[in-house]
Amino acid sequence: MKDFLLNDEDRAFRQDVRTLLHNELTPRAAEIEDHEDWGAVKAVVQALGQAGYLALMFRDLYHGPLSAPGLTHATILSEEAAAINYAFETTIATAISCAYPLHHYAQHSIRDRYLRGIVDGSEVGAICVTEPNIGSDSSGMETSIQYDSQTDEWIINGFKRYISNASVADTYIVYGISNPDVVPQKGMSAVVVPKATAGIRFPRNYTFMGRRGCIVGEVEFRNCRVPADHLLGRRDEGFRIMLSMFNFERVILGGSGLGVARSAFAIATDHAQERISFGQKLGCKQLIWDKIAQMSWRIDSAELITYRAAKLYDAGALSPKELMKPASMAKLVSTETANFCADQTVQILGGDGLTKEFGRAEQIYRDARALSIVGGTSEMVKYLIASIDLPHIKPNL
Ligand SMILES: Cc1cc2nc3c(=O)[nH]c(=O)nc-3n(C[C@H](O)[C@H](O)[C@H](O)COP(=O)(O)OP(=O)(O)OC[C@H]3O[C@@H](n4cnc5c(N)ncnc54)[C@H](O)[C@@H]3O)c2cc1C
């Protein structure tokens, strides 16, 4: 049975999301993929914001029909969007990830100023963690966030790379070291930096093999100054803020992987039932059955594990530490499933799987590859999972 973790309201919501995406995203998907059309991405972000879908994680801001909006619904949104165009979905997933610390940790005036635009879709946000010398291991972070008591401002200096929405964002959540005399986990802070801040630069955007249409690039901060109230949470609390984001971000990535896997599977099953080879439909061959069956059970497993994590999160009964394993498993299983399905679909399609002229299999194959790297690589989330199962052993990273 599919999606039995979801209730009738969740399913009705999925139907509403599908309708909106069918009207807004499907007609623009080719523009986004072929021309990396940011205007098309932005138009769909606005449509989702106006429909209230970017406020799903924030019950006090949500004004739609759902009785208890939450991560389950944000994950459904991601799954449905990624099934149509994963690049687009990354833009909204980043926006929600940026909105989360603003909602939970910003002072009221700052929250009102920067969150509203992200949630109503008129603005987008970016999260700035990764640097040239730090990726999986954030302990060597070099960006500094220093307090200037004379002007009552934070001064940000640093270079961030691989930042989704880099040059097109309006608001940046920036992580950096505020106390270099202690370990980074205890000396990191997070600040809100609006785009208009003097000293912010966007040296370049990258050209990726997939996710075309999602702008990812570098952001440089040179003596950028923001008022003291732009600090999120307390001084030196940045690492904890960063960790608090990961649980829900990884469940949403579970939804992204699921959407990508589902769209690959649909192409594979259609082709297997249509293509004639050796006088029979390709789908009659046992080796093809094996591929279809493997995709099918992996997608069902990913779905169960992802929505289990989302439901656990929404129930609110588990601590962030207890949620870490189910959320990490959702990310790992779904993103590996997306890669598996994308690869097997190309194989089932043969030459047609490699060409733009015969459909989306090649695009899905290129898009899927990022999923096991972003938001914590597969290796890193495996460490997190095993660290719960082996509580008395510290992994040798
Ligand atoms: C498309 C895209 C969008 C992104 N968007 C953002 C964003 O919006 N904001 C942001 O801050 N960052 C973003 N990132 C950065 C992303 O989070 C990092 O790429 C990711 O965390 C991995 O870091 P890295 O690329 O430096 O790889 P590294 O950390 O250098 O790792 C390289 C490889 O080594 C493996 N590895 C590392 N350490 C170990 C170990 N101890 N044991 C075993 N294996 C190990 C990793 O798993 C990986 O396979 C984005 C990246 C991409 C590709």
Image: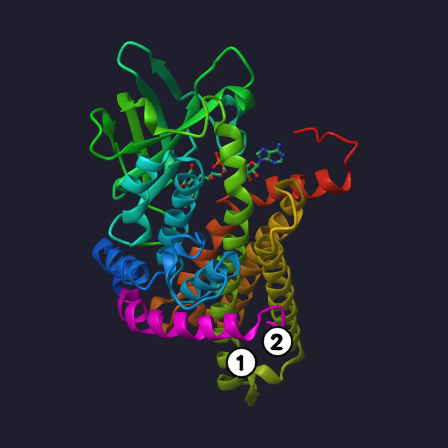
Q: Is residue 63 above or below residue 397?
A: below
240 with respect to 225 (left or right): right
Q: Quadrant of residue 150?
A: top left
Label total for image: 2
- Name the residue: 77% across, 31% down: 393
For the residue pair 52 and 211, the one nearer the viewer reads as 52
Q: Quick check: is the Cβ at mark 1 less than 8 Å away from ligand 1?
A: no
24 falls in the magenta region: yes
Mark 1: secondary structure: helix
Out of 9 and 350, give the one closest to the viewer: 9
What range of the chain is rendered magenta? 3-30
At 56% across and 82% down in the image, what residue appears? 282
Residue 231 circle label: none
Q: Are marks 1 and 2 in contact (CB under 8 Å)?
A: yes
Residue highlighted by disc 2: 288
**In the foreground, 52 or 292:** 52
Q: Position of residue 80 (x, y in %)?
A: 44, 66
How far from the left and from the top, in percent, is residue 92? Answer: 37, 53
In this picture, is 103 found above or below 5?
above
Amino acid type, residue under disc 2 in the picture? Ile
Drawn side of residue 214 relative to residue 236, left or right = left
Q: Where is mark 1, residue-wise?
A: 272
Distance, label 1 to label 2, CA atoms, is 8 Å
Looking at the magenta stretch, what is its main secondary structure? helix
Question: Could you tell me if residue 160 is visible in this image?
Answer: yes
- Residue 272 spot, x, y in % from top left: 53, 80
Q: Amino acid at mark 1?
A: Ala
Asked if residue 72 lies in the magenta stretch, the reply is no
Residue at x 26% of width, y 13% of height: 151
Question: Is 164 displayed left or right of 374 in the figure?
Answer: left
Q: How packed is label 1: few (under 14 Cα within 10 Å), some, or many (20 or more)?
A: many
